[in-house]
Amino acid sequence: MAINSAALSLIKRFEGLRTTAYLCPAHIPTIGYGHTRTVKRDDVGKKKITEKEAERLLAEDLKRFESDVTRLVKAQINENQYGALVSFVYNIGPGAFAGSTLLRKLNSGDVAGAAKEFERWNKGGGKVLNGLVARRAAEKDLFLSPVKATPKKTPAKVG
């Protein structure tokens, strides 16, 4: 499964595009749409990328985090739940997700309980951050949103 456009928009909106390396609120060197894996502290303020490079890094990162969600989630989930979880893991990391109460509740079948857990993940550097409060609310909303069924085309009757 790959994330849907709603999840991709959510990630891009909350990560924002920064073409010069910077320290995020949790003091982690970051560039592009929240990419951290290949950014060093010495890159902050110096390393620059294009929007096209940021899109490539985002696509690579998403593959890794999609794989983490697929590997860790044992429950049946829909594409909105999957997308919300990929956004969540993109932000907190697979290690934190693997040990989370959210994942434990989801895998035990407690979808409502899992949804409530999003809002607990609202801190960066030990402080409640308004951006994380808003992001978790958006992820929870997407997680709880039913997937719209694609209408099936009925063959036209001839004659």
Image: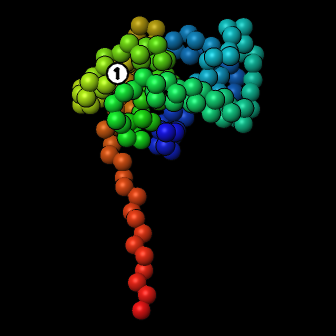
In percent of width and height, residue 4 lies at: 49, 43
Kindly give the residue lying farthest to the bottom in the view shown.
Answer: 159
Q: How many marks?
A: 1
Instruction: Using a 10 Å C-alpha cutoff, classify the residue at mark 1 as few (fewer than 14 neighbours), some (14 to 19) or many (20 or more).
Output: many
108 versus 154 height, above or below: above
Q: Is residue 64 left or right of residue 75?
A: right
Q: Is residue 18 visible?
A: no
Q: Is residue 82 left or right of residue 58?
A: left
Q: List the residue tagged with mark 1.
A: 103
Q: Is residue 143 left or right of residue 22?
A: left
Q: Is residue 110 left or right of residue 75?
A: left
Corner quadrant of residue 30: top right
The residue located at (61%, 23%) in the rendering is 35
**Colouring scheme, one of rainbow, by chain, secondary structure, one colour:** rainbow
In percent of width and height, residue 69 lies at: 46, 27
Q: Is residue 28 visible?
A: yes
The residue located at (57%, 25%) in the rendering is 64
Q: Amino acid at mark 1?
A: Leu
Depth order, front residue of 108/151: 108
Depth order, front residue of 7/132: 7
Which SS class for mark 1? helix
In percent of width and height, residue 75 lies at: 33, 30
The residue located at (63%, 17%) in the rendering is 37
99 versus 72 height, above or below: above
5 versus 46 height, above or below: below
Corner quadrant of residue 123: top left
Quadrant position of the C terminus in the picture: bottom left
The residue located at (68%, 15%) in the rendering is 39
Depth order, front residue of 122/140: 140
Corner quadrant of residue 107: top left
